[in-house]
């Protein structure tokens, strides 16, 4: 039995296979509409989520399966003091596969050690968000046709952004990737990402503060919001929250085929008028997330579609 806790739990070849399956699901949805008949997905979300939880639910329902779970810790037995280990032991009796989001780093990993069913990390604190990373990789591959030889700009909150950390870890396994890390000093990529991921990979990277100066060289621009919930000091949040806003004027500096990604939710870091630019890929990214999660559910359950579930 396999779990997906860290974006590197799947090899590069396995990621390619999974993205190929996601692409086939996109092209041939009816082929997979009953692939998870009589299978149940549990969504254990100890932290608020709209997109990720609904994406998992949409994915499972689209495969003919069903969904059960809770949308906040307040509505679960954790409010009575139940441990993650006990919760997953119980849920293992009800469901075939589980997606867990938790504010504490390492909680999904702990759950996987006590689980009788596959556990998918749907985000743990400021740590990892592997299904978002797979979604990002699918979107980049669809837009550029490759996952190597790219200059990737990551902009905004690079300190607390788990989507940024996961994407850097995953893209570092491909050849000729160059990272441009765009942030204020207070929100730079954590040292462990530099020392444990970027430096050992041998890939080129630069840390800069100007989005405008970086724009002309980027193949991908990954925007993030400054996350109020990760700040201890509201004054710091207010000072930094509008550090980078992507506007039509800034888009004029970019390549004609650059793609703009964003894990969402957006606050004000991308102007609404940018939505009309064909380079805006963030709502396409949301749709890709459903296909990727469908491919992941099938893979972890050992199903491939068609009638093999019968």
Image (spheres, helix red, strand yellow):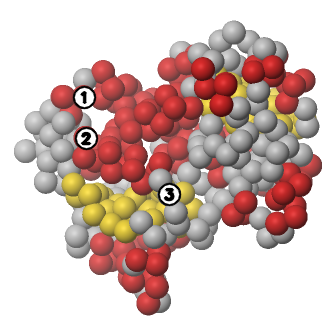
130 in relation to 90, above or below: above
**Front position in the image: 271 or 265:** 271
Inter-mark Cα distance, 3 to 2: 20 Å
**Front position in the image: 271 or 92:** 271
Inter-mark Cα distance, 3 to 1: 26 Å
- In the image, which is nearer the foreground, mark 3 or mark 1? 3
Element type at mark 3: loop
* Tag of residue 49: 3
Quarter occupied by residue 309: top left
x and y, in percent, of residue 250 in the image = 81, 22
Q: Which residue sits at x=89%, y=46%?
A: 184
Inter-mark Cα distance, 1 to 2: 8 Å
x and y, in percent, of residue 106 in the image = 57, 67
x and y, in percent, of residue 191 in the image = 83, 54
202 in relation to 101, above or below: above
**Residue where numbered disc 1 is placed:** 29
Q: Judge from the rendering whether residue 145 lies leftward or rightward of residue 18; answer left or right.
A: right
């Amino acid at each position: 039995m396999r779990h997906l806790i860290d974006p590197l739990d799947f090899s590069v070849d396995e990621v390619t296979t999974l993205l190929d399956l996601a692409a086939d699901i996109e092209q041939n949805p009816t082929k997979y509409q009953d692939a998870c008949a009589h299978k149940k997905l549990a969504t254990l979300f100890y932290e608020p989520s709209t997109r990720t939880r609904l994406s998992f639910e949409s994915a499972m329902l689209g495969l003919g399966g069903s969904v059960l779970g809770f949308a906040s810790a307040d509505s679960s037995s954790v409010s009575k003091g139940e441990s993650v280990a006990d919760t997953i032991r119980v849920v293992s009796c009800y469901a075939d596969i589980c997606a867990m989001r938790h504010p504490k780093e390492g909680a999904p990993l702990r759950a996987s050690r006590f689980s009788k069913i596959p556990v998918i990390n749907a985000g743990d604190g400021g740590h990892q968000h592997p299904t978002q990373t797979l979604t990002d990789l699918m979107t980049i591959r669809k837009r550029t046709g490759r996952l190597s030889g790219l200059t990737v700009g990551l902009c905004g909150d690079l300190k607390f952004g788990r989507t940024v950390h996961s994407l850097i870890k995953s893209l570092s396994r491909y050849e000729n990737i160059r990272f441009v890390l765009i942030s204020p000093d207070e929100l730079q990529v954590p040292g462990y990402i530099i020392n444990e991921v970027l430096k050992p990979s041998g890939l080129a990277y630069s840390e800069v503060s100007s989005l405008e100066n970086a724009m002309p060289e980027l193949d991908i621009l990954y925007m993030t919001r400054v996350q109020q919930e990760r700040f201890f000091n509201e004054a710091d949040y207010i000072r930094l929250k509008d550090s980078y806003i992507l506007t039509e004027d800034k888009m004029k500096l970019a390549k004609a085929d650059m793609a703009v990604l964003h894990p969402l939710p957006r606050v004000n870091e991308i102007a609404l008028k940018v939505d009309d630019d064909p380079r805006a890929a963030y709502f396409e990214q949301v749709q890709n997330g459903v296909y990727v999660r469908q491919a992941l559910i099938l893979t972890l359950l050992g199903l491939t579609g068609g009638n093999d579930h019968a």
